Structures are given as structure tokens and as C-alpha cells.
């Protein structure tokens, strides 16, 4: 009887070891995210992994005093199941959307993965925890570069150009893209309210969906578009590529 019930008990040394391992494994993944300036970084991954391990330890060993009670049934997976479903709320906070560009999905997935690693550590399933940590790091470091290389000519891009409303502006921007062999998949024109920032001139956003086969030609087209006199701002996949100071700031610089 003692041998059977001993599986529900753990020494303080083993408890500490598992929590330290959770910090290490979560920290390894979090360091990669931190290094590349992603929303959830080093400390976030450590806390998720450590928290998951602690909940797993609680689920298995926290109720050992009730093992021998006749009307109590011990289920070590009951709290772990709540971690798996609940961690999605934290991962969703790392997902950002800017137009058609979505970022943070990989970080959200890594948060979910370190939660699973923490559960493995807490349950003493250390081989799975070690191999899972290694595979997650390989996926984030090695496969990320391989994916970018394979998909470099297949991804669609979104180009947003803020312009002063001007006759023929759309044709000029489209011509600059066409001359570089860039295919326009879709285009939208979004008028903006006139503001004192640009001297009460009517401004507009031109939003293009593009198929880019040559990144160098794409950058050349962006440079040409940014240099047009009526262009105020260019964004490529939500990232600023060129900016013209508002008239009020230009006067201050003179």
C-alpha cells in the first residue's frame, strides 16, 4: 500500500529541480523571441513554462493527503486540461493585425508550446520536455530561415501610399510598380479628412495588394514612389518605408 501511494508524493529536492528546469526550458525559447523583438519575450515564456509546471505539480502532488479517502478520486490531468485551454487567451494577446498583415502568430504558438513543456516538466516527463524544447528552438531558428528562403518569391505584399489628392496620382503609382514587373492584385482608395497637419490639403490612402517576384525591384519601385511630389508616406506590410514631414514641421526646420 505504501508503494502504491508513494507515487502521489514528491521530495522537495525533486520539486525544486522540476521548477528550475521549467525556468531553463522556457527561458531558452523566450530568449529567441526576445532577441528578435517579438511581443512575448524572455520573461513571458519563463513565467508561462514555470506556471504550467507548477500547476502540473499541484495537480499530481498537491492533493496527496486525500489519496486514501474512500470517496475521493485523483485525476492528475484535471488542472493540466485547464492550462491547455486557458493559455490561448495569453497567446491571442500576442497576435497583431495591421491591414492584411498579421504578426505574432509564431509567438502565440511558442507561448502555447512552452506551456506544454512546463506541463511535461511538472509531470516528470523530462525526456519529452527536453526534446520538445530542442524541436521548438529548431523550428524558430532554423526552419524560420528556410521558410523565408523558400517563400521569398511567393508571398503577397501590401503597400500603402499616403498621397495628397492629385489628378493622375493612382496611374503614376501603378506605373512605377508595373515598370518593375510587380503585379497588382487589388487596389483600394481611402479618402481622409483634411487636417492642418498637411495644410488642409485633401489626403488619400492608396492600398495595393501586390505579387512580388523580385525584392530588389520592389524596393526600387518604393524608392521611386516615395520620391513623387504628392506622396507623403509609404508603408510596406505595415512598416514605414518613406515619410515626408508635414508642412508645419518643415517650416520649423527652416
Image: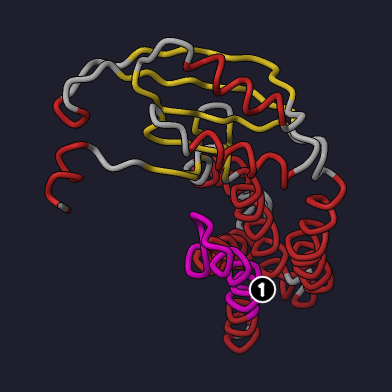
Q: Which quadrant of the rendered structure holds the N terminus?
A: bottom right
Q: Residue at x 37, y 18 (%)?
A: 204
Name the quadrant containing residue 186.
top right
Please state if 186 lies on the left or on the right of 147 as rendered. left
Mark yes or no: residue 73 visible.
Answer: no
**Colouring scheme, one of rainbow, by chain, secondary structure, one colour:** secondary structure
Q: Between residues 70 and 231, which one lies in front from this camera angle?
A: 231
Q: Is residue 105 above or below residue 21?
A: above
Q: Is residue 15 magenta?
A: no
x, y percent for residue 219: 64, 44
Q: Between residues 143 and 9, which one lies in front from this camera angle?
A: 143
Q: Residue at x 60, y 57 (%)?
A: 69
Q: Main secondary structure of the magenta part?
A: helix
Q: Which residue is mark 1?
A: 25
Q: Is residue 40 magenta?
A: yes
Q: Is residue 202 above or below residue 114?
A: above
Q: Is residue 181 above or below residue 153?
A: above
Please state if 19 lies on the left or on the right of 204 as rendered. right
Secondary structure under tag 1 reads helix
- Label 1 Cα crowd, 10 Å radius (few <14 / some 14-19 / many 20+): many
x, y percent for residue 209: 64, 23
Q: Is residue 247 above or below residue 121?
A: above
Q: Residue at x 74, y 72 (%)?
A: 124
Mark yes or no: residue 232 visible.
Answer: yes
Name the quadrant containing residue 133.
bottom right
Q: Number of callouts in the render?
A: 1
x, y percent for residue 122: 66, 68
Magenta stretch: give its range.
21-44
x, y percent for residue 201: 23, 19
Q: Residue at x 58, y 36 (%)?
A: 102
Q: Between residues 109 and 177, which one lies in front from this camera angle?
A: 177
Amino acid at each position: 500500500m505504501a508503494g502504491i501511494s508513494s507515487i502521489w508524493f514528491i521530495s522537495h529536492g525533486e520539486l525544486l529541480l522540476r521548477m528550475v528546469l521549467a525556468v531553463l526550458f522556457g527561458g531558452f525559447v523566450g530568449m529567441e523571441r526576445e532577441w528578435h523583438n517579438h511581443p512575448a519575450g524572455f520573461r513571458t515564456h519563463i513565467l508561462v513554462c514555470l506556471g504550467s509546471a507548477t500547476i502540473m505539480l499541484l495537480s499530481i502532488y498537491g492533493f496527496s493527503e486525500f489519496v486514501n479517502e474512500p470517496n475521493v478520486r485523483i485525476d492528475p490531468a484535471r488542472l493540466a486540461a485547464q492550462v491547455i485551454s486557458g493559455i490561448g487567451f495569453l497567446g491571442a494577446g500576442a497576435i497583431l493585425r495591421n491591414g492584411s498583415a498579421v504578426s505574432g502568430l509564431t509567438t502565440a504558438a511558442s507561448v502555447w508550446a512552452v506551456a506544454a513543456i512546463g506541463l511535461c516538466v511538472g509531470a516528470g516527463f523530462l525526456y519529452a520536455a527536453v526534446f520538445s524544447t530542442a524541436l521548438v528552438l529548431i523550428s524558430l531558428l532554423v526552419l524560420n530561415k528556410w521558410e523565408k528562403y523558400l517563400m521569398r518569391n511567393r508571398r503577397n505584399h501590401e503597400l500603402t501610399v499616403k498621397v495628397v489628392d492629385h489628378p493622375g496620382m493612382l496611374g503614376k503609382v501603378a506605373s512605377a510598380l508595373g515598370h518593375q514587373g510587380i503585379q497588382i492584385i487589388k487596389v483600394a482608395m481611402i479618402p481622409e479628412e483634411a487636417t492642418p497637419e498637411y495644410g488642409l490639403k485633401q489626403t488619400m490612402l492608396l492600398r495595393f495588394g501586390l505579387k512580388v517576384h523580385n525584392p530588389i525591384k520592389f524596393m526600387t519601385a518604393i524608392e521611386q514612389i516615395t520620391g513623387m511630389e504628392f506622396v507623403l508616406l509609404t508603408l510596406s506590410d505595415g512598416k514605414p518605408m518613406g515619410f515626408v514631414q508635414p508642412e508645419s514641421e518643415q517650416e520649423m526646420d527652416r
